[in-house]
């Protein structure tokens, strides 16, 4: 008789421990916050123009703090050497051979985007 009570007590303890473990695991998964992604695209910004990448003369404390608290990426591909086609490749997902934006002073894309008005002179 004592063995049956002891076995029932052990089963109850194991079930309680199991339930508590499952609840703790579920709670830890619920508290995970999705990551914030900040993508900074700046015209004419070189690799070493930020303090977080070694710049000593120009102070960039806020960007340096982002880099310290988050991740730094050291390999990136720009769609073009000038800003308008680079933005076009980023926003469309196409490479410069497929997007219509080929340079900063392209009359065809500026006129098309602005309904016939010229954007760049």
Image (spheres, helix red, strand yellow):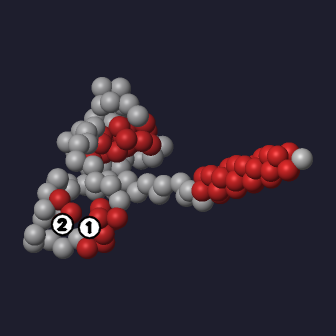
Q: Residue at x 20, y 42 (%)?
A: 81
Instruction: In the rendered structure, find residue 51 and report the number of the disc placed on it.
Output: 2
- Location of residue 63 with respect to 91 vertically, above or below: below
Observer able to see residue 117: yes
| Tag 1 residue | 64
Mark 2 residue element: helix
Instruction: In the rendered structure, find residue 20 and report the number of the disc placed on it.
Output: none
Which of 83 and 19 lies nearest the eye of the viewer? 19
Mark 1 residue element: helix
- Location of residue 93 with respect to 115 vertically, above or below: above
Q: Residue at x 43, y 36 (%)?
A: 92
- What is the CA distance from the residue labelled 1 to the residue labelled 2? 6 Å
Mark 2 crowdedness (10 Å alpha carbons): few <14, some 14-19, many ≥20: some
Residue 35's x, y, as percent? Answer: 48, 55
Which of 107 and 9 lies nearest the eye of the viewer? 9
> CB of mark 1 within 8 Å of CB of mark 2?
yes
Number of numbered markers: 2
- Location of residue 69 with respect to 40 vertically, above or below: below
- Disc on the earlier residue, 1 or 2: 2
**In the picture provided, is 26 more to the left or to the right than 55?**
right
Question: Which corner quadrant of the image does residue 69 belong to?
Answer: bottom left
Residue 104's x, y, as percent? Answer: 26, 45
Residue located farthest toward the right when viewing the structure as drawn: 1
Q: Residue at x 38, y 31 (%)?
A: 94
């Amino acid at each position: 008789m004592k063995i049956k009570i002891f076995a029932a007590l052990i089963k109850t303890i194991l079930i309680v421990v199991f339930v508590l473990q499952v609840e703790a695991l579920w709670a830890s998964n619920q508290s995970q916050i999705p990551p914030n992604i900040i993508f900074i695209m700046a015209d004419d910004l070189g690799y070493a123009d930020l303090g977080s990448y070694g710049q000593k003369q120009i102070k960039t404390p806020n960007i340096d703090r982002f880099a310290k608290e988050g991740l730094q990426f050291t390999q990136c591909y720009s769609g073009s050497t000038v800003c308008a086609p680079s933005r076009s490749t980023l926003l469309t997902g196409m490479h410069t051979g497929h997007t219509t934006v080929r340079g900063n002073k392209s009359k065809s894309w500026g006129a098309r985007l602005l309904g016939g008005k010229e954007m760049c002179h």
